[in-house]
Structure formats: C-alpha cells, structure tokens
Amino acid sequence: MELIYNFWQLFLLSAPWLMLGLLIAGILNVYLPTDFLNKHLGKEGFWTTIKAALIGAPLPLCSCGVIPAAIGLRRAGASKSATTAFLVSTPETGVDSVSVSYVLLGPFMAIIRPIAAVISAVVAGLLVGREDKQTRANDENTPKSESSCCTSHQVVAKEVCCDTEKLKAEEHASCCAPKKPALDASCCSSSAQPVKKISVWHKLKSAVSFSCNKLLEDTMTWLLIGLFFAALVQTYVPAHFLTQWGSGVLAMIMVIVVSIPMYICATASTPIAAGLLMSGVSPGAVLVFMLAGPATNIATLGVVAKELGRRAVAAYLIGVIGVAVLFGFLTDYLVAEFGFVVSPLLQQEHDILPHWLSLICGVVLVALMLRLMFKWVTNKIYVTSN
C-alpha cells in the first residue's frame, strides 16, 4: 500500500507540470513557425545548441513537463543537438528552482547550479549532434541504387505563371518519352480563393487537441514507468542510504545510480538536496544529484531513445553525467579552497503548488489517459473483429 500511495503522490506532484508541458508543446506545434525553428534550432552546431540550452534554462518545467515540450520542439523541426540541449537544461534548472536553491542552499549553489546546467546541456547536445553526423556520414557512404531513365533525364523548372507564373519543362531525350506538363489553369485564374485566416480560438483548440492526443499518447507509457521506478526508490531505498558515502567520487557515483530511476524536477530536488547536505553528503555530490536526477530519469532516457535514436542515449548520458561529476569536484574544491558557504535553511517547508490544484490536474490527467487507453482497446477490438 505504501508503494501505491507514493506512486499517487508523485503522480499528483507531476500532474500540473506535465499538463503545462503538454500545453507548451501544443502551442509550439501550432504557433511557432517552422522557418523560425529551422533558422534558429534546425541545424547542428555550437551556437544552435547554446541557443536551445539558454531557451530551456529559465522555463519552469520539470522532467515530466519537458518531455512533451521537447518532443513537440523536435517534431516542429529542431535538430537533435538543439532538442537534447533543451531536454537537459530545462529540467536541471529554472527561475523557480534557482530561487528555491538560494533559500535552501545559499547563493553559491544558486549561481553554480544554472551555470552547470547550461554547460551540461551544451555538451550533451554537441555529443548527440556529433553522433547524428556520424550516422548521416555512414548513410551517405552506403551504395545507392541507380535511378531509372524516367527520373534522371527530365528537369522541371518552375517559374511564376501568368506573366510571372509559367511552368516549363526542360526535356532531354530519354527512353520514357516524357510529356510536357500542362499549364495549371488554376494558377492563372483570377477567381482563386483567398487564404482563410485561422482564428486564435481555433489555433488554441488545435494545440490542446494535439497535446491531449498525439503527444500524451507518445509519452504516457514512459511517464508512468518513470513514476513507478521513482515510487520504488522512495519506498524501498532507506533515507540514510546516500549519507553513508559522504564525499568524493564514490558518493557521486552512488548519487547518480540512485537518481537515474528517480522522477523528480529541479525545484522538488532542492529540498531533498538540502536534507542530504544536512546528513553529511558533500556539496559536490548534492550538486550532482540536482543535475543528474532531473535529466537522467527512466522516462527521459526512453524518450531520447525513441525520438533521437538508441545511439544518442550513450552520448546523452556521457554529456550529462560527465559534466555533473566535473562540476561536483569543482564545487567541493571551491568550497574547501575559498570557504563558500553552502547551508540549508529548512525552517519553513511548504508545498510548491496548492494541493487542490495538483489534485484537479491529477484527476484530469487520469481521465485523459483512460480515454486514450479506451480508444486503443477499442481500435484493437475493431481490427481483430475485421
């Protein structure tokens, strides 16, 4: 019963952020022009990755909310490196988590945390983008079949029709005897229908429909798996398990091992990090927990494998974990060498969101998931019967 209770509590905590992420993803899909994404986030490269990391860093989305938003960004035209950088920087930090870090861990951690998150996102994005380049290069080196004579000897050039709009075909002798394409009368027709402007309400309706159907269907399974593993860790891993490792690389490794199955956002991880700090875990290991926990959970890794490819998972983990460990050592060094104060202030503990809001969002989310499951079962029965 405790496992079920913890699962439900985690689901309620995640529900508002997940619904916010779904809404943002739908808005990105409907409102964000494709040419904007192609211009700013559509190419692999250093500056594109940095822009994606900086765009995601201030957004108040947790690891559950960023998944549908990142998928929407990817399917709207963003490159693999940009999608990865957004997927890492968004849950690792945010305007809300920075303020909570300042209160619970002090100004030093509030400053180094977002810096480490952005650098971690950039490194992971570049590694995934490099993996994508290698994959494309291998594809280009594979022998391609020869094109037929019907497709290799006809060049069609389009100009503007009606003085400025003409369609002409440049033909070459071929075995297929190509025909000249006829001029499309509708191109020159003066009675062409004007493009109808889509209303704001219709766009918003399309965004909500896209979020509650396609995106939720694509992410629902991994979200539930991630929450279940998080409930397992919360139920069966003792609270003092991490504190016995203290500091050093072993403590950071143990923090990473435990944080991977956890499903926690940057803001919610901060009180836990403060508790670990009070129990004797080093500031560096605490920072590793706050970076690796939100970015390397089971649900995120599953989506990375599905949307970016299985080869990208290794590059993703190397970028996130490698930078987290490096900044963990840097944090311990700076604290020891320069005496930066990292102290938790837990006198006033309160929920981030009202319980009634989490409950309403949780019930709505359950209804949407049950609706999708009912549609899936109905379709299976229909296909089987036919």
Image (cartoon, rainbow, N blue to C red):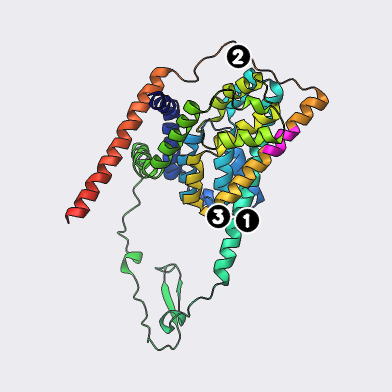
Answer yes or no: is residue 1 visible: yes
Say which of 275 and 363 sits in front.
Answer: 275
Which label lies toward us, 1 or 3? 3
Kindly identify which residue carries mark 1: 130
Question: Where's residue 294, x and y in %?
Answer: 55, 34
Kindly identify which residue carries mark 2: 346
Ranked by sequence position, the earlier of labels 3 and 2 is: 3
Residue 263 magenta = no
Q: CA distance from mark 1 to mark 3?
A: 11 Å
> Mark 2 and mark 3 in contact (Cβ < 8 Å)?
no
Label 2 crowd bin: few (<14), some (14–19), many (20+), radius 10 Å: some
Question: Where's residue 13, x and y in %?
Answer: 45, 25
Ranked by sequence position, the earlier of labels 1 and 3 is: 1
Answer yes or no: is residue 42 visible: no
Kindly identify which residue carries mark 3: 311
> Residue, x 41% and y 40% (percent of image)?
26
Magenta segment:
325-330
Label 1 crowd bin: few (<14), some (14–19), many (20+), radius 10 Å: some
Label 3 crowd bin: few (<14), some (14–19), many (20+), radius 10 Å: some
> Residue, x 68% and y 20% (percent of image)?
106
Q: In the drawing, does residue 101 fall left or right of residue 330?
A: left
Q: Mark 3 belongs to which amino acid?
A: Arg
Say which of 36 and 386 sits in front.
Answer: 386
Say which of 283 and 129 sits in front.
Answer: 283
> Which residue is situated farthest in the left direction here?
385
Question: Where's residue 220, x and y in %?
Answer: 39, 40
Q: Mark 1 belongs to which amino acid?
A: Arg
Above or below residue 57? Residue 40 is below
Q: Secondary structure at mark 3?
A: helix
Q: Secondary structure at mark 2?
A: loop
**In which quarter of the view is residue 355 placed?**
top left
Above or below residue 151? Residue 24 is above
